Amino acid sequence: MFQIMILVFVLGYLAIALEHPLKIDKAAPALMIGSLLWVLYILGVENILNLGFSSSWKEFSANHEGSGLSQMQDFIVHSEIIHHLGEISEILFFLLGAMTIVEIVDQHQGFRVITDKIKTTNKVKLLWILSFLTFFMSAALDNLTTTIVMVALLRKLVDDKKTRWFFASMVVLAANAGGAWSPIGDVTTIMLWIGGQVTTIKIILGVFLPSLVCMVVPLILLSFTQKGNVTRPVVNENCEGAETTAFEQKTLLILGVGGLLFVPVFKTLTHLPPYMGMLFSLSVIWVVTEIMHKNKATEVKNKLRPINILRKVDTPTVFFFLGILSAVAALQSAGHLNILAQKLDEALGNVYLIGMAIGVLSSIVDNVPLVAGAMGMYPVLSPEAVQAAANPEYMRYFVQDGLFWEFLAYTAGTGGSMLIIGSAAGVAAMGLEKIDFIWYIKKITWIALLGFLSGSGVYYLQSLITHH
């Protein structure tokens, strides 16, 4: 069963990758493997757990009385599924809240306040403006929310579908690069920050330049291939003007962006998960919107009420997330990812190579469990523990703000850009713009790889100066 789980994951992954030739929405195979892997896991639970690769089972069996099949089933049903569902739900409700806020702002033409300021239609200029805007927004919000906002903006700026795919792909690269150097910019960096592996100032100083290079190299390459101007979508001014006033557009934009920016503040103040802050922001915007339109004509009011806007939110993307994260959770629980982490350590034994391998792998497997696996493999060492170790020169990379943790934040954050389903930002863009997986591999993967390698090289050179 242990090997069959890997086979099912690979086949499901191929079905997701070949979504367009198969003409089956990627959410369907994702949900299928998300369910099937847990079924296979519980059917073969004795064989799988007796292999001894599951660290969570070792912890569970040490703290709970009983033994045999019933305890193993209890471990999966009442411990692991509940634990992973909690983590997955946090991401899904965060995503759902962010998508709804962006949709409300969009329906009220709030983004026109920004799009009207961007006058250029030159492809290269527009690419640079939007990429840098995304890069810094991603550090303040997070890469997922920023991508949702920027894709909504792109729909107002670029009419042609294939051109918009190029822009949306560059938004994904810029969002992932921007998220890597900020403690609140990416789920994996948040994990390392909360876990005590990195501190705020050090992660910004250590990873900012490599992240910038990771974005600028693809931008330079695309500057040579993208020629001419973009055509903007035709907007029916009369229709829009009748529905929302300039005051309402600005109010909703300020509320929307303010609500999204409030999320990291909420988390810092309350120590509650970010999704609660996102849902609170949504509730405030919802109430304000209802009050704003209560005296309007029924037809206009119905179009602009959040209850109706909710129907436009991209539910298949949420289901896709649920499926793929459930599948990865099953592999993590059964011990597949632990084996992967150990093999990396044995085969490479070099912090730069391990970091880069995790980066490349994060484009295939979700970077969250990969980073979680690395955090489990390597504890944060105190300076005393480093001195006492048999190999202090190697072990010093694993202290707080050590080279390994900083480089891991960079590689896990930016490596996912190499495939469209390798990061939360990529999945969101793929869902919103229906970007073809194969098209992304042909057109974007190689420039994303060059950006990733360039940033890694810059980090290596930088570390030679700062760490020696």
Image (cartoon, rainbow, N blue to C red):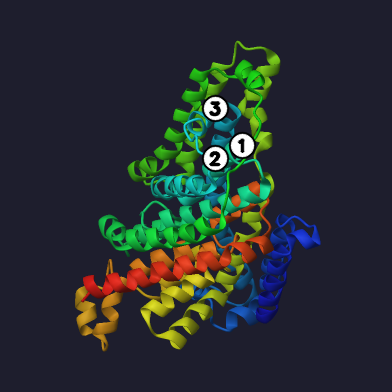
Is mark 3 in CB contact (under 8 Å) with mark 1?
Answer: no
**Callout 1 amino acid:** Arg
Nearer-the-camera pick, 225 or 17:
225
Say which label, 3 or 1, has the lower sequence index: 1
Q: Residues within 10 Å of mark 3 (few under 14, many from 20)?
A: some
Callout 3: SS: helix
Q: Which residue is mark 2?
A: 121
Q: Which residue is mark 1?
A: 232
Residue in view at x 63 percent, y 24 percent: 304
**Farthest residue in the front direction?**
228
Callout 2: SS: loop
Quadrant occupied by the C terminus = bottom left
- Calculate the distance from the C-alpha at mark 2 to the C-alpha at mark 3: 34 Å
Residue 249, image x, y percentages: 52, 24
Q: Residues within 10 Å of mark 1 (few under 14, many from 20)?
A: some
Callout 1: SS: loop
Residue in view at x 38 percent, y 40 percent: 266
**Callout 2 amino acid:** Thr
Relative to residue 52, is residue 323 drawn left or right? right
Q: Tell which tag, 2 or 3, sits nearer the viewer.
A: 2
Residue in view at x 62 percent, y 39 percent: 231
Q: Which residue is mark 3?
A: 286
Q: Residues within 10 Å of mark 2 (few under 14, many from 20)?
A: some
